[in-house]
Amino acid sequence: MRGIAVPPHRQGVDHLSVTFAALADPTRRAMLAQLALRDMSVGELAEPFDISLPAVSKHLKVLEHAGLVRRSRKAQYRPCRIDAEAMKPAVEWLGQFALLWEARFDRLEDYLAELTAKERKRGRRK
Amino acid sequence: MRGIAVPPHRQGVDHLSVTFAALADPTRRAMLAQLALRDMSVGELAEPFDISLPAVSKHLKVLEHAGLVRRSRKAQYRPCRIDAEAMKPAVEWLGQFALLWEARFDRLEDYLAELTAKERKRGRRK
DNA sequence: GTTGTATTGAACCGTACGGTTAAATAGCAA
DNA sequence: TTGCTATTTAACCGTACGGTTCAATACAAC
């Protein structure tokens, strides 16, 4: 089986990218919002959107591939269940980023403190 | 001026989608991580990556378009500064989502409580 | 001026994306 | 069996994406 075609510069596409990419579509985010409320079949899920069913099916495949949605089978239906755990890495990346960002201001404070200290020294010396 | 070509089904592409899309690339995330530490020129920023400068420039344009990066000019240099505020809507969406998700379990609890109550009633009746 | 450095623009390539329609599959119901 | 419903697959279309190379621009320095 040939797996999905992966362009050379995209080899080993990380989970984080897949997740963010899955979230980067308003339809898919709306679907996730629906599924956060309750499990739904594909048709049910598709109802609020005026796109074709195959389009919905594709979106679901993207979400599924990102691990954000799992599906079982019940008769003809393929009920979709959300897996919010899969959101975690994305949340954590943003969290880590916030940390870096805050650290920067800490350094800025240090720098300013240093400047003030020097200023004080110079003042004394003067 | 013809603005960027927007396909009909993508009209009015929301800020949230643009932000998540900008985050959906490992190179861009790495760039943001660098810029979280300190402002950097394009060349400086490009150094760790073995892609061409125009590629870096394009990534920067994506980040800039998402409001995640601002640039000024200093001589030939176009120093990049991060704007972490622009990350907020994404973080907030994830937060709102988590709320929905938790609410679901609250409802499940309610449902189970209701079931147990009924069960108790039936038990009494029997 | 000319030269050198930093950055962007233009044109191109191959794959991905989001959508469509039409046909195929899977399972229930008569 | 035949038919109905739910969903996916296949084939296609146009634009976006991430990359390239080569040329252009912007500014500094000589």
Image: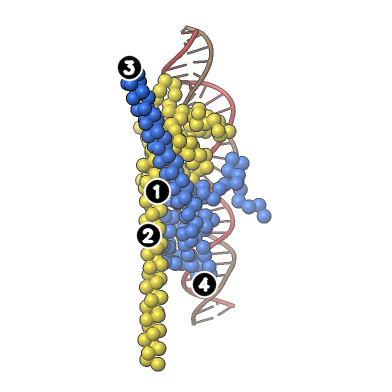
Chain colours: A yellow, B blue, C red, D brown
Asked if C4 appears above or below C7 in the picture, the reply is below
Q: Which mark is drawn over residue A99?
A: 2
Q: Position of residue B2 (x, y in %)?
A: 66, 52
Amino acid type at image mark 2:
Leu
Residue nearer the viewer, C19 or B112: B112
- Residue at coordinates 37% horizontally, 59% vertically from top-left? A99
Q: Nearer the viewer, mark 3 or mark 2?
A: 3
Taking the image as drawn, is residue A18 in sight? no
Residue to which mark 1 is pinned = A90
Q: Nearer the viewer, mark 4 or mark 2?
A: 2
Taking the image as drawn, is residue A39 in sight? yes
Marks 3/2: CA–CA distance: 60 Å
* Label 3 crowd (10 A; few <14 / some 14-19 / many >=20): few
Residue nearer the viewer, C23 or B120: B120
Asked if B91 appears above or below A103 in the picture, the reply is above
Please determine if labels 3 and 4 lie on a single subunit.
yes
